[in-house]
Amino acid sequence: MKKFAIAIMMCVAAMSAKAQVITSETVNNVYEEVSNKPNSEFAFNAEFTGKDITTMYVYKKSNGAKDMQTLKPHLKYEYAYAADGTLTSKVTYHWNDSQNNWDCESRYNYTLINDQYSVEFSRYNPIAHTFDQPIDKMVYQLFPFDSVENVSYYRRDLSSPSYQLISQAHVTDQNRLLAER
C-alpha cells in the first residue's frame, strides 16, 4: 500500500509540474535547496566527484546539554550518472544505531530511451547481499522538452517475471491546451 501511495504522489507531481529527466544538476539543485533551508530538523553533507554529487548524507539534528546541537546519522544516498550527466541509479542506506553502520535498503534505476523515462525500484536483500529484482516501475512518456504526456505505474511480485500495469494517467498540459485554442 505504501508503494502505491508513492506511485500516486509521483503521478500527481508529474501532472502538476513540468517533469524533467533527473541529472547531476538536478541532484545538485536539490542538495542546495535542502541544505540551505533554515530551521530544518536535518543537516546535509555531500561528497563530490568533479561537479557531481556521488554521496549525500542526511543527519538528524537534536539538542543536547547546554543547548549544544548534535548531529546523528540518518540516511545516505549514493548516486551514479551516465556520461551525459543523467542519473542512472540512487541507492538508499539507513543508519543502524545498534551496529553503528549504514544498512543498505533500496535502489532506484533510471533509464532514458528515446521518449521514455523509466524508474525501477528494488529492495536490498541482506541475506543474499544483493538487490532483488525490481518490483515497482514508473514509465513517463515524454513530449519534447521533457514534459510528461503519460505516466504508467507497474508492479510485479518477486515470483513473477513480468510487470502488471496498476495505473495509468494521461497528463494534459494546461498551458499547451490554452495555446492551441
Image (cartoon, rainbow, N blue to C red):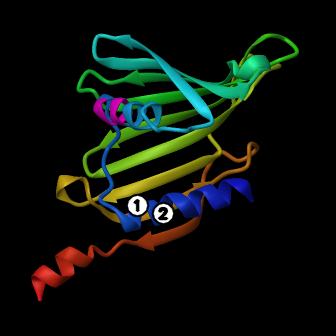
Asked whether 38 or 7 is in front, the reply is 38
Residue 169: where, in percent of width, then height? 45, 72
* Left or right: residue 2 compared with residue 37: right
Describe the element under mark 1 as helix, strand or loop: helix
Residue that lies at the very extreme toward the right in this rendered image: 98
CB atoms at circles 1 and 2 under 8 Å apart? yes
Q: Which residues are magenta?
A: 25-29
- Vertical placement of residue 138 versus 62, above or below: below
Q: Is residue 12 magenta?
A: no
Please report the residue visible at 37 percent of the width from the left and 31 percent of the height from the top: 32
Residue bearing the label numbered 2: 11
User: Within 10 angstroms of label 1, few (less than 14), some, or many (20 or more) residues?
Assistant: many
- Vertical placement of residue 47 versus 163, above or below: above
Residue 36: where, in percent of width, then height? 42, 33
**Observer able to see residue 128:** no
Please report the residue visible at 79 percent of the width from the left and 18 percent of the height from the top: 65
Residue that lies at the very extreme toward the bottom in this rendered image: 181
Residue 15: where, in percent of width, then height? 39, 67
* Left or right: residue 27 compared with residue 94: left
Please report the residue visible at 46 percent of the width from the left and 17 percent of the height from the top: 46
Please report the residue visible at 66 percent of the width from the left and 60 percent of the height from the top: 4
**Observer able to see residue 10:** yes
Structural distance between the alpha carbons of marks 1 and 2: 5 Å
Asked whether 174 or 4 is in front, the reply is 174
Residue bearing the label numbered 1: 14
Which secondary structure class fits the magenta region best?
Answer: helix
Query: In the rendered image, which quarter is residue 144 located in?
Result: bottom left
Residue type (three-letter) at the residue carrying disc 1: Ala
Describe the element under mark 2 as helix, strand or loop: helix
Query: In the rendered image, which quarter is residue 74 located in?
Result: top right
* Left or right: residue 113 compared with residue 79: left
